[in-house]
Amino acid sequence: MRRALCAWDVDAVSLAYAPVGFGDYHWTALDARGWRWFVTVADLTRKVQYGAGVADAWDGLGRAMDTAFDLRNHGKLDFVVAPLRTAAGETLRRLGSRYAVSVFPFVDGAPGDFGQALSSDERGLVLDMLAALHRAAPPASAPALLPDLSTRATLETGLDELGRPWHGGPFAERARALVSDGDGKS
């Protein structure tokens, strides 16, 4: 990890695992200048939203990171927390054959909770940001997405198995009951 961070000119004097977020691995890094960084390591074998396989995941995640960078730096959307570029201009670098690393400026803040109600002022700020995002010209790195599901086969398998219990997690059986009921009242 320390070697990978050198591509961003981050000479990490300390790394601390940050058990936050969903689906990736995160660390905070402190460099010799006292600057803090947020480091994300993505498991490319688990990025099925970008297609089948590590190569598709690498390409899709790279486009997503480049898009965020361009929206912040060229689209002037300062609310976008975007990855930094390496000296070679990359927003994403390989960490072995299975993982990819990206580095972000560290942003102090307090996370919210899923389902947390926002105040009227907070909702207004979110709407303003969404409007600005939708007014921005899409960067060249932003893919045109077809209306398709990358995990359609998994969804179809689940729909074919509505008559049998689902064992995919603590809410799997409740989800199966809701889907099989069809009216959403279960």
Image (spheres, rainbow, N blue to C red):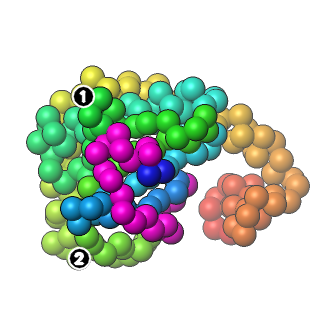
| Horizontal relation, residue 173 to residue 59: left or right | right
Q: Nearer the viewer, residue 27 or 56?
A: 27
Q: Nearer the viewer, mark 2 or mark 1?
A: 1
Q: Left or right: 182 with respect to 92?
A: right
User: Which residue matches tag 2?
Assistant: 119
The span picked out in magenta is 3-23
- Position of 20 relative to 52 (above/below): below
Callout 2: SS? loop
Disc 2 residue crowd, few under 14, some 14–19, many 20+, Cα 10 Å: few
Asked whether, in this view, residue 48 is left or right of residue 147, the answer is: right
In this orientation, which residue lies closer to the viewer: 73 or 115?
A: 73
> Which residue position is annotated with label 1?
139
Q: Residue at x 21, y 39 (%)?
A: 71
Above or below 185: residue 54: above
Q: Which amino acid type is marked by label 2? A: Ser
Q: Which kind of residue does numbered mark 1 sit on?
A: Pro
Q: Is residue 15 magenta?
A: yes
Q: Measuring from the top left, give residue 127's x and y in whole percent.
A: 20, 57
Looking at the rendered image, the quarter that the C terminus falls into is bottom right
Q: Write down the quadrant of residue 45 in the picture.
A: top right
